[in-house]
Amino acid sequence: MLIGIPKESQAQENRVAIIPAGVPELLEAGYEVIVEQGAGDGAHFTDEEYRSSGAIIADDAESLYRQANIVVKVLAPTEEEAKLLRPESTLISIMEPWDNVPLIQNLAARSIDSFALDLVPRSTRAQSMDVLSAMAGISGYRSVLRGAMSLPRYFPMLMTAAGTIHPARVLVIGAGVAGLMAIATARRLGAVVEAYDLRPEVKEQVESLGAEFIEIKVEESDSEKSSDNNGYATAKTEAFYEAQRSQLGDCVARADLVITTAAVPGKPAPKLITRQMMQRMKRGSVIVDLAAARGGNAEGTVLNEKIELDGITLVGHVNHPSRVPVHASQLLNRNIINFIKNMTEGGRLVPNQEDEIVTATQVTRGTSIYFEPAQLNQEENA
Ligand SMILES: NC(=O)c1ccc[n+]([C@@H]2O[C@H](COP(=O)([O-])OP(=O)(O)OC[C@H]3O[C@@H](n4cnc5c(N)ncnc54)[C@H](O)[C@@H]3O)[C@@H](O)[C@H]2O)c1
């Protein structure tokens, strides 16, 4: 079976799904590998490196899609790319399936098997395939660098002949994978860090990184749990978020840099910082809103823009992993190879329908849609 690695077509996407060092492992597992010319350019891997690792180089996307039995990408294919996929081929990529229902229906209509890497379960066995964690770590790290570069102040405490500089105060809202990496990075740069998450179980992790955990008491009915069975936060009522905002106000006001990462899978990001709260912050303070892709945690965040609002810099860039393309691609490569090998038997992709990793990630199989929200939509359209 021929695995195809196309060049990512989305503007400013520098990552590549498989790096040259990953090719021999796929060959050893019994596959052949074809790579689109220039696929690794953004991540500084050359065609020559792919060639000497044993891959075939395709002149363009059309030639690659025409030949590949399995297409492995970083991001979901565009409409044009989806049309190039061979009927009965397999697609493996990050798919953001909640936002890509028409694509999913199109794949099923053309009998393409597809797997969404962003649906890999949060289990111990699947940890080495977990692209969301790998990428969230990079986002957390880079959000702090981005914030530090936008801040008109030093980060660490400094005693100089010209006086003492107090350390920057950083507030991290949402202490999941990205938030914990942001805390660690901000601490390494010398900031005083506070963090908050609605899941109280992360307190210990936050404290072990040298940050202070902010405890907020919000009345919750017993039936409302702060996290679901996968460890993800659950969506809350507007009254709940209002109570959170009123208690977070002072913490936001005293921070020089706020990093927000609060997310609920498949739902708009909760609004945790209002314009009113921003007006209490010092001029020149910075908010880096990692939840911008789902509407943002801060009021006024503009996706992929850096704007000034009431004297505050609001950063809405989200594709941080693409700005660290060498290591982002290296981690994705590892995740994806583990994912493929988990379904490989004798050099062929043989998804075991009893394997939780297969069933959780399978979006389409033949003409059937397995991703439930898209399934409902398909029934409505029928
Ligand atoms: N293999 C594994 O076992 C594995 C791998 C990765 C993550 N996880 C777990 O999965 C969970 C989700 O991690 P994630 O980083 O993908 O989360 P995420 O990106 O979905 O959300 C980021 C954080 O925002 C928090 N959040 C949501 N709403 C909030 C609100 N209103 N106020 C404050 N915080 C809010 C969430 O609790 C989460 O910690 C965590 O428990 C993490 O430890 C497990």
Image: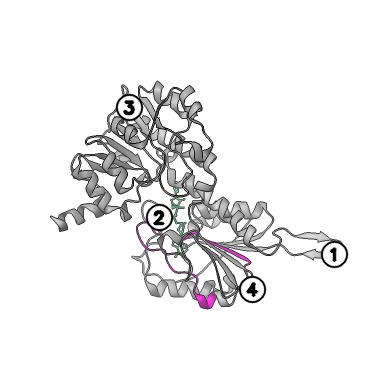
Marks 1 and 4, how far apart at CA: 23 Å
Residue 145 falls in which quadrant of the image? Answer: bottom right
Dots 4 and 2: beta carbons under 8 Å?
no
Marks 2 and 3, how far apart at CA: 36 Å
Answer whether residue 247 is visible to the viewer in this image.
Answer: yes
Which numbered disc flags the more N-terminal residue, 1 or 3? Answer: 3
Which numbered disc flags the more N-terminal residue, 1 or 2? Answer: 1
Amino acid type, label 2: Tyr
Which numbered disc flags the more N-terminal residue, 4 or 2? Answer: 2
The kind of secondary structure element at disc 3 is strand
The boundaries of the magenta stretch are 255-277
Neighbourhood count class around disc 2 (C-alpha, 10 Å): few under 14, some 14–19, many 20 upward = some
Marks 3 and 4, how far apart at CA: 57 Å
Which one is closest to the eye, mark 2 or mark 3?
Answer: 3
Answer whether residue 137 is visible to the viewer in this image.
Answer: no
The kind of secondary structure element at disc 4 is loop
Magenta span includes 343: no
Name the spot of residue 147 as percent of width and height, x first: 60, 59
Name the spot of residue 351 as percent of width and height, x first: 28, 33
Magenta span includes 273: yes
Residue under circle 1? 162
The kind of secondary structure element at disc 1 is loop
Residue under circle 3? 2
Asked if residue 237 is positioned above or below residue 315 in the image, the reply reads: below
Which one is closest to the eye, mark 4 or mark 2?
Answer: 4
Q: Nearer the viewer, residue 179 or 220?
A: 179
Amino acid type, label 3: Leu
Residue under circle 4? 282
Dots 3 and 4: beta carbons under 8 Å?
no
Dots 2 and 3: beta carbons under 8 Å?
no
